[in-house]
Amino acid sequence: MREKPPNKLIHEKSPYLLQHAYNPVDWYPWGEDAFRKAKKEDKPIFCSIGYSTCHWCHVMEKESFENLEVADLLNETFVCIKVDREERPDIDSIYMSVCQMLTGSGGWPLTIVMTPEKKPFFAATYIPRESRFSLTGMLELVPQIHNAWINRRKEISDSADEIFSALQVSRPRGEALDRSVLKSAYRQLVSQFDEEYGGFGTAPKFPMPTYLLFLLRYWKRTREEKALEMVEKTLKALKMGSIWDHIGFGFHRYSTDRVWLVPHFEKMLYDQALLAFVYTEAFQATKNPEYKKTAQDIFEYIARDMTSPEGGFYSAEDADSEGEEGKFYTWSEQEIVDALDDPDVILKGFNVSRKGNFSEPGRVPAGKNVLHQEKPLSECAKNLDISCEELDERVEKARKMLFEVRENRVHPQKDDKILADWNGLMIAALSKGAQVFREPRYSDAAGKAADFIIDTMVTSFLYHRYREGEVDIPGFLDDYAFFVWGLLELYEATFEVTYLKTAINLTDDMITHFWDVKEGGFFYTSDESEKVLVRQKQSYDGVTPSGTSVAMLNLLQLARATGNTDYEEKALQLSQVGSEMVKHIPSSHTFLMTAFDFAAGPSFEIVIAGKLSSPDTEEMITALRSHFIPNKVVIFRPDEKSPEITRLSPFTRDMTSISGKATAYMCQNFTCNLPTTDVDTMLEQLNEVP
């Protein structure tokens, strides 16, 4: 059988685009070639946006884009463009806004039909090949659009202009936020909280780590026990549910149901990073060892399966293998019995049955099971009349055996591109883990990733994507903000000044190229990027925080670390852009609330002076890291003449150790205390019980 000829995607680096390189659809990558062709032939653009681990993107490809009849229709009617949303989040964001505007919802695959001038006039998500129920199929829809393009062009043009105008509406700068917005955000999250099963909302249910990070800070600020209760119930439910991979570790993307039973199985790097960060901070706050273990297990998964030889972190793992969602992760009862000498600890502890507990929505279970716990293992130990320690040992032995069996299965595809923004999140998480768990392996991994990005993806600007030796796509706001967040955490984990220096340089570049000098705030794209339809600003925090929110927190921390109040002024202006919307729905801006919580204070600047390798310095730093004090920056000032840190943080110039002992200099809300060499005194100044 002769191999099908490839289309124009064959020369791309994106795994998602390469998945479609042998479709009979004459796909173009996003670029001027496609738009020139559309203008020359007077055709609209059919733009399909997705990502490599998207289950319904695979379904639409198999059903429609591999179908010759559909392909012929598309090729005759349109110029067809494929976009990887993870490579081009700027394009995805604009046209997702259009989809939500026109249909009231969004998701992927995202289908946009636009004029050759990039102005959209039709939007949808998944479209079947043939019409069914309320969905119009491709075979019916494409002729309808073609007819409208030929016979109702003015109507299309007017509609496209109207949509374009709506996209250009800016969010004006409003009044500054005050502390009442923190309480409003908390109350809104209380109203969304699932008291029975943890998490927020109903199905589908996402982990929402940005909510949890804010709630931990709200608890710290107010000692409102309900805030911590919501965090803990959610973290425990996530770990017991099948959204957690009990065999190989790591979190799946979301649960299709309210009870965390049936996950959507793709694993995203950003989820691992943000959830590891939350579990690490939850351990700091509560000292619950289960939270520490969960974060460490995530890091094990990342080191084992998601780290490139260069040190960067891969983007995602697919939900599907062998054409079936979840096949890699599910088990029949017999498979577990055959694999284990001691199957009862898994069968009983993780609710495995002959009938099965897993099926795709609307289907009857077919003997397949996802491992999940309906009750903690401690209760299972009681029922089995054994100690918790013995049960833990038996479960871990069984887990390792099942892992070895599973390794022989066909693995889901890995999206091995390296993205600067998502890598920044993982660098931040590993660096936080290194600090809290006193584990240099984590800071080594974070440092290797950061060095790779600095050496390979930073030239006169930061690039967004690396794959197979190629860097491409000038960075977006998220790349700068998230990577700087990672660098700031890495500096505090290692006190390597080069990371703080790079964070400052990238932040200055971000201000130069992304800041709106007229209305304030950061654009998502730089002034040197490709000119897309509109330059958007984003502050909404969803499953990941917005670049705006992270940038605000970075600016506040850099202001305190360097003494440069210009950064603080920029952070204030950020909080004012669209502030009326933020006040209305602060729960949709929870990482912005995290940044504002820092701004509202109390916050601390802590300088430790001494010798980094000496026991008294280590004792002081360890004491700081053992407490949950999120609103602080820590600077290390080595006992040497004119260390480099004094050039970045001039106020540390005269902060030397007293009598050769490690010394803490602490300032709170722009007021400084007398230095101390006593750890307990330092903690008391931080309002912490020694």
Image: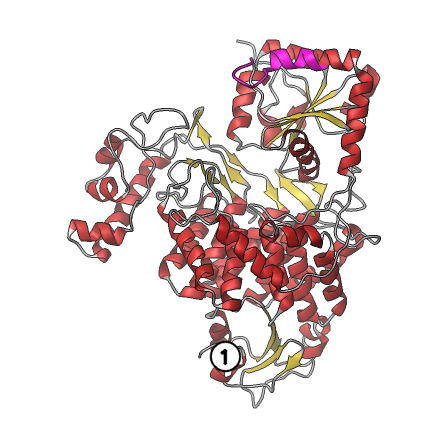
Q: Is residue 134 magenta?
A: yes
Residue 437: name its quadrant: bottom left
Q: Which residue in the structure is indicated by mark 1?
A: 683
Whole-percent x, y for residue 196 in the image: 38, 48
Can the viewer see residue 533 in this picture?
no
Viewer-side residue, 183 vs 122: 183
Can the viewer see residue 539 in this picture?
yes
In the picture shown, does residue 211 fall above or below 151?
Answer: below
Give neighbour class at mark 1: few <14, some 14-19, many 20+ (Cα, 10 Å).
some
Q: Which residue: 43% across, 25% down?
A: 322
Viewer-side residue, 690 vs 675: 690
Apparent side of residue 353 relative to residue 448 in the rendered image (left or right): left
Q: Which residue: 49% across, 32% down?
A: 413
- Identity of the amino acid at label 1? Leu
Q: Is residue 673 magenta?
A: no
Whole-percent x, y for residue 646 in the image: 70, 75
- What secondary structure is found at the residue carrying circle 1? helix
Q: Which residue: 48% across, 61% down?
A: 281
- Quadrant for the C terminus, please: bottom left
In the picture shown, does residue 368 fall above or below 606?
Answer: above
What residue span does the magenta drawing correspond to?
A: 131-145
In this view, the residue farthest toward the left is: 385
Whole-percent x, y for residue 42 in the image: 81, 16
Residue 602: name its quadrant: bottom right
Apparent side of residue 85 relative to residue 381 in the rendered image (left or right): right
Q: Which residue: 67% across, 65% down?
A: 556
Total labels: the figure holds 1
